Amino acid sequence: MSLFFPYLLLTIGGLTIAYVTGRLLLGQSAEATEPYFGVFLAMVTGLSLWVGTYAAVQTGGHTVMLPVPLLMGWLIWKQRGSVVKEGLWLPHALGYAMVIAVVLYVFRFWLFYDSESTFLATPFQDYVFYARVSLALNKTGIESTVLESVFPQFIGAQPYHYYELWLNALLVRCTGLSAMWGLCLSTYTILLTIVALGLRALVAHFGHKATWAWPLTVLLLLSGGVKWPAFLHYDFTKNGSLLAGSQVLLEPKLAAIAVFIALGVLLLVRRRYDLAGLVLACIPLVYVSTGPAIGGSTVVLGGYLWLSRRATYSQVTRLLLPMFLTIGYFGVFYVVQPASFQLREPGLQLIDELVPKLVEARTLLNIFIGSLILYGLFFGLLLAACVVVTTRCAWLSQRKELLPVLVWAGACAVLAAAGRTLATHFIDGFQFSGNVMGALVPTLLAVVLGAAFGGVNTWRRLAALTLLAGAAVVNCYPLLQDKFQKQTATVYSAAFLSQVQAALPDREVRGGFLFGDKDYDNTYMLSEDTYSAGTYLAGLSNRYDLMSLSIFAVDSLTTDPRYRLDSVQARQRLHSASLYRYARLMVPSRHMPTDSLQYQFVKQYELAFICASAKATLPEILRPLVAREIMDPRSGEKVYILKQ
C-alpha cells in the first residue's frame, strides 16, 4: 500500500499539468460551448506537447514523435479563439475528469493488489518490457526496442508505439519512481482518464443529460471489445479475441490510440475536417501498427467527402495533406537513421518468411473473410445494442454529419482485416487488426448510441444499456474469479521479494536469467528482451539489466513444432540475445562448450545475479560463483546472488 499515494499524486499531477498547459494555449474558446470537449481537447493537446517536446529534447530531434507536437500546435492555433464566449477556468467537466481518474486509478491498483503480500503482483511480461524500454529511452535517447547493454552497436531506431513510453519516461525522469509501476499505475491511468473524457464528450455532443450519459460512458469503457469464453474452444474462433476482443480498459497500451481516435471523431462530427486531418495523422506516429488502417481509411474518407460533395476540394486537401506528410516523414526518418550492426546469417532471410506468395491468394482471401466473420461474432452483442436504438428511428437522415464517421470507421475495419491478412506470416500480424478495433469500437459506439438515444423511447435506451452491460459482465466476470490469471500477472511471496531486494546492490548492475526448454511455448518467448525470468526486479528498482544465459540448438527450429512455422523469425529472436552475439563476436573458438561460454560471459561482464525460472537448472560450472540462493515458495523461481 506504500505505492498507492505516490502514484495517485503523480496521476493527478500529470493530468493537471496537461490540462493547464492546453488550456493556457487554447484559451477559453472550446469550453464555452461544450465543457467536456474543451477539457478533453486541452488535456490531449497539453499532454502531446509535453510528450513530443520531451522526446525531441531527449533524442536531439531524432524522434518519430517530432510531428506530433507540430500537428497539435497547428491544431491549437486553428482552434484558439474560434468561440468568443467566456468559459470557466475550472469547469465542472474538469472535476468529473479528476473523479474518473481516481476511480480508474483505484481499479488499476486493485488489479495488482495482493491481500497476502506487502508487494503488488508483477504485471504481464509485455508491460515489464514496455517499462524497460521507457528506461532505455531516457538512457540512450534512441527510439529502439533493443535492450542491449553489452553490444550497443546493435541498437538502432525502430518503429513502435512510443507515445505512452515517452510519457512514462518523462514521469520517471521527473520523479525517479519505478518505471514499471509508473507505467501500469500512472501513465495508463492518465491515458484511460482522457479516453473516458473523450467518450463522455462524444455523448455530450449530442445533447444528452447526465441521466443517460454517464451510464453509457461507463459501459462503453467496459464493453468496447468482448472476449467470449465459449469461442476459445473452437479452432476457427479461439484466436478471434486477438482480432476483435481487445479492451482498452484491460489492455491500456491501446489507450493512446483511443485518445486520438476519439478526438478525431469529435472533430469529424463537428465538420472540422481540417483539424480532424491533423489529429488522424498523429495516430500512425503514436502506434505504428495502426498506419495501414488509419492512413487508408483517411484517404477513403477524403474520396467520399469529395464524391458526395460534402466537402470542397480545399477541405479534402487539408484533411489528407497531414496524413501524406506524416507518412512521408515516417519513411524518410527511418531511411536516414544510422543502421544498427547486423550479423550475417545463412539461409532464408526474414522477408522471405513474411511476404505472402502468389500461390497463397486463395488462403489469404479465406483469412480476410474469416476476419470479417470474427468481427461479426465478437461484436455481435454490441451490434445488437446499436440495432435496438437505430431501427424505426430516422436518426441517420437527421444526423447526416455522422455519415463521414461511419464511412471512415467502416473503411478502418475492412483495412484492419486486410492488414491482418497480408501479415498472416508475421507473428505479431494480429496487431494490425486488434490494436485498431480495440480502440475504434468504443468511439464508434459512442457516436451511434449517443446520436440515436435522443430519438428513441426509454425502453429502447434501457435495452441498449442492458446489452452493453451484458458485454461488460462477460469482460469483468473473469476478473472477479481470478484477476491475476485474467491478466497473466505473477504473484511472488513477500518474504522472497524482501530478501531479493535486500540482497541486490543499490546501483546499476547487470544480471542474467535462465529459462528451461519447457518455459518456451512459442516463437514470441525466444526474445530475451520481451520474455525473461526475474520480471519482479522491475518493480524493485530501475537499475537492473537482464540478459539471457539460456542456450538452444538452432538446428531444432525447423523441426520443433513450437517454432517450425516461424523458424526464420525464431532464429532472428534467438540470435538477438547478448550471449549469442558474444559467442559470434568475442569468442575465438566456435567449439567452446556451452557451459564454459556461459561462465566466461558471466565473469567478463561481471553479472551480479542470475534469476532462474522454476523449470530452469543452474549449470554446475556456475555453482562456485554463487554466494547465496533465494527461492520463492509460491512460484518456484530462484535468484542466485553471485560473488563480487
Image (cartoon, rainbow, N blue to C red):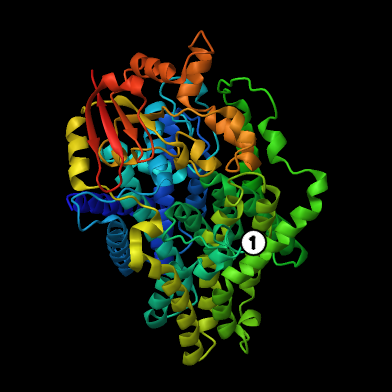
Q: Secondary structure at mark 1?
A: helix
- Give the image quarter of residue 30: bottom left
| Residue plotted at (52% across, 64% down) | 266
Total of numbered circles in the picture? 1
Q: Residue furthest right?
A: 359
Query: Is 386 situated above or below 5?
Result: below
Q: Which of the two residues, 161 or 577, is positioned nearer the viewer here?
A: 577
In percent of width and height, residue 284 lies at: 57, 47
**Rendering coords of residue 274 (x, y %):** 60, 56
Residue farthest to the top, as pictured: 588
Rendered-image quadrant of the C terminus: top left
Q: Residues within 10 Å of mark 1 (few under 14, many from 20)?
A: many
Using the image as rendered, state which of residue 453 and residue 228 is in the foreground.
228
Q: Image height check: is 59 above or below 317? A: above
Q: Is residue 322 visible?
A: yes
- Position of 372 relative to 70 (above/below): below
Is residue 270 visible from the viewing direction of this image? no
Residue marked by disc 1 = 413
Q: Amino acid at mark 1?
A: Ala
Q: Residue at x 55, y 65 (%)?
A: 233
Taking the spot 33% from the left edge, 27% from the top edge, the residue there is 511
Residue 162, above or below 209: above
Residue pushed farthest front? Answer: 620
Q: Nearer the viewer, residue 65 or 427?
A: 427
Expressed as whole percent of the image width and height from the top left, the position of residue 568 reads 64, 34
Determine whether, in the image, residue 394 is placed left or right of residue 41: right
Residue 300 spot, x, y in % from top left? 71, 58
